[in-house]
Image: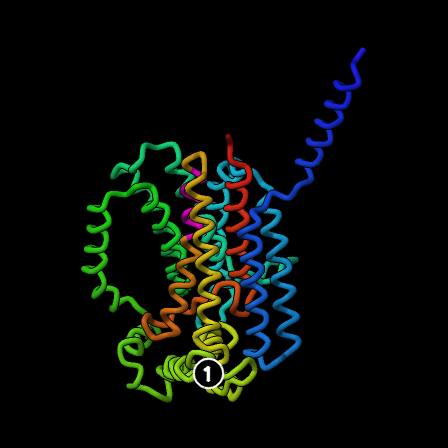
Amino acid sequence: MLSPRTMLDAVRGQVGERTRLFRLQVDPWLLFTLCAILAFGLMVLNSAAHEDSAVLTDQALRIGIALIAMLIAAQVEPRTYLRWAPALYVVGIVLLVVVLVVGTIARGSQRWLDLPGLPRFQPSEIMKLAVPLAIAWYLHERRLPPRPKHLIMAAVLLGLPAGLIALQPDLGTCFMVAFGGLAVIVMSGLRWRFIAAAFGLMALAAPALWFVMHDYQKRRVLTFLNPEQDTQGAGWNIIQSKIAIGSGGVEGKGLFNGTQSRLDFLPESHTDFILAVIGEELGLRGMAVLLLLYLVVVARALFVATRATDTFGRLAASSLTLVFFGYVFVNIGMVSGLLPVVGVPLPLVSYGGTSAITLLVGFGIVMSIHTHRRT
């Protein structure tokens, strides 16, 4: 016959198991900071969209879906992502090929799929997750730093989707997919001589790229080098963006008091150039708050990567984090005139749901790697 103490311990054990079963597997630091960025974004979007309630409601709905997707992703064990990474990559490649054949054309690019029974979506977004996970899967059981033959295979896994996306053409997404794949390779311990050689080859190949670029891409490069050459045309966006950021000063003009966006001088004020709205209305202080939140997210996620107990978790978490950092870096660079305009939104702030879902699912995977780590 069991003693009362033994029975009590058994009941406590069962309760503990049920508690662990129903407990959400999330990282509080990441969850809180990401929600703070999303709330900040909704506040600014309300001004950038001229207080259009339909835009704000639509964005809030998309954010809700993205948060649910992140929470679901965080509950899945990392070994499941490891197992399904190759299949996700193959499905993504197939969809990219289908896009080139029967995709919907909009604004001169063929990027979207309209499949029966499904909402219109952009398959290239899948590759922002699939490429880092696939390369991490390929390298996780191989000796690191990777040997040249393994680097070649990783480059193929990276180059195939990047090339298909470039054919759409979608330069911004192509860059982000390539950046995510390169992040995995670099974080795998790639020797500095290989990194230097890669930069050298890219520098040598850069002039040849001019002859295969589309006309609008050439105009973007020329506008980046000298936006004042066409102040009423190609250079308008970046000139107005600089004016907006500069006029905000340190304290800003106040929320809903900006002139560049409210008077429609600043195109795409609620999407790619929403950072200029922040600079004008909230000033340097507002931009500093947002950048601090971004910094906390990146620092925490990289800390999670360092605590991963296997190679796949370390490579996947670090690369997905660097993809997020790449979004921030490229958007700030293009809005301030330090980089060409490539159509990369400000993460979790710009209007749009596709990139938000992709990024938050990525952070869900990062949370999963942290909360399910093996001891």
User: Magenta residues?
Assistant: 312-321
Residue shown at 48% from the left, 55% from the top:
297
* Horizontal side, residue 85 vs residue 167: left or right: right
Residue type of the residue flagged with mark 1:
Leu
In this view of the protein, can residue 203 be seen by the observer? yes
Q: Is residue 185 left or right of residue 328?
A: left
Which secondary structure type mostly characterizes the magenta part of the structure? helix
The percent coordinates of residue 40 (x first, y second) are: 56, 68
Badge 1 local density, few (<14 within 10 Å), some, or many (20+)? many
Secondary structure under tag 1 reads: loop
* Direction front: furthest residue: 5
Tell me residue 327's x, y (percent): 42, 62
Q: Give residue 118's position: percent from left, percent from top.
A: 63, 58
* Nearer to me, 155 or 305: 305
Please give the name of the residue rendered at 35% of the width and 32% of the height, measured from the top-left corner: 142
Residue 171 visible to the viewer: no
Q: Residue at x 79, y 18 (%)?
A: 4
**Quadrant (top left, top right, bottom left, bottom right) of the N terminus:** top right
Nearer-the-camera pick, 190 or 131: 190
Which residue corresponds to mark 1? 266
- The number of numbered badges drawn on the structure is 1
- Asked if the stretch drawn in magenta spans residue 70, the answer is no
Figure quadrant of residue 338? bottom left
Colour approach in the figure: rainbow
- When asked about the image quadrant of residue 208, the answer is bottom left
Name the one closer to the observer, 165 or 104: 165
Q: Is residue 226 above or below residue 298?
A: below
* Relative height, residue 5 to residue 276 (above, below): above
Residue 317 in magenta stretch: yes
